[in-house]
Amino acid sequence: MRQLPHMNELNEKPGLHVYTLYAQVHPLPEIDEIINKHEIKYPIAMDGFSEVGFDTSGGLPQMWIVGADGKVAFIGVSGYSEALDKALEQVKYPGLGKTAVAKELTEAARAFGDGEFAKAYKLAEAVYDNAPNDEVEAEAEYIMERIDDRMGALGVRAETAEVEKNYNLAIACWKELARYKGLGDAEEAPERLKALTDSKEVQNEIARRRELLKIMCDLDVQFQDVNEEDPAAMLKFRKGCLKLYRTFARDNAGTNAADEAEALVEIFERIVGEEEAKSPDSMPDPAPKKEPGK
């Protein structure tokens, strides 16, 4: 827990993306308490069951650092600060995909790295219009296309998330797109964001998704007391999961959370069916033995 405030500080560094893989077992209210206590601002990946395989014998949290080249630069519990500093030295213009640009484009690249995307676009556009050679023109075009591509990807992702009723993701995408204020493709972002945050239907969807997550966390806690070597105990637990997910899907029909629950129902129906088929109680009685001579 002592690293959590430090992670907040690191998350503010340009070029560094911090997120947590939650791989412990607690009820959702307890997790909320920790998040609120430490004012955690970075993403925590826990919306659903996931298998995270790594050795925690050396302590927690385990840290991974992925460099600008996409390769793992560090794994461990201590010494990550030095590794981070070294990795960040390779990130001159965060998100640009370049470590060097023509001198005419230094200001545009720096603005891009600082998240001033409209300024970066206009500076690159001005250089493009008056480029001294083809190489500089191509680099200026690259910066503009980089910004256009990111805006386009955010817009598509936000629209898709809305269609899928994954409103937490949609809101996050519109918030990010709003940072491109001053550029055409970002104009509608504030309005779309407000429409989602003001919508009672959207807030209900978010609440239902959270309720499903609470059920999943509670079941994960209960599972810790189940003897995995006891087929009958495992079958009983899985039947309990199936019942809860069926009830949730029925009571919240029409919501995205209900669709997620239905997917879980299908999984547990298959598992329970397979387990019941292997149960001794499901085997037919053996045929009576014939007496000799009859």
Image (cartoon, rainbow, N blue to C red):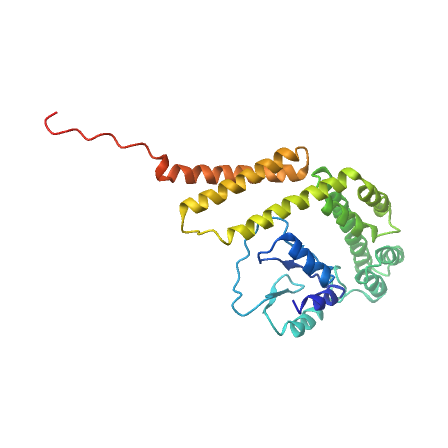
Q: Is residue 101 left or right of residue 7?
A: right
Depth order, front residue of 104/16? 16
**Quadrant holding the N terminus:** bottom right
Give the position of the C terminus as an image quadrant: top left
User: Is residue 263 visible in the rendered structure shown here?
Assistant: no
Judge left or right: residue 42 versus residue 293.
right
Looking at the picture, tell me which residue is in the foreground, 243 or 170: 243
In the image: residue 252, left or right of residue 51 = right
Q: Where 286 falls versus 166 (above or below)?
A: above
Q: Which residue in the rendered view is the most extreme toward the top?
A: 294
Image coords of residue 144 (percent x, y)? 81, 53
Q: Position of residue 71 (x, y in %)?
A: 61, 63
Q: What is the count of numbered marks?
A: 0
Q: Pick the residue in front: 289 or 74.
A: 289
The percent coordinates of residue 45 (x first, y second) are 64, 54
Q: Residue at x 71, y 69 (%)?
A: 6
Residue at position x 82%, y 57% in the image = 140
Q: Using the image as rendered, state which of residue 125 and residue 37 is in the foreground.
A: 37
Asked if 161 appears above or below 293 in the picture, the reply is: below
The image shows residue 255 at horizontal and vertical percentages of 68, 36
Does residue 129 appear in this view?
yes
Q: Is residue 277 left or right of residue 124?
A: left
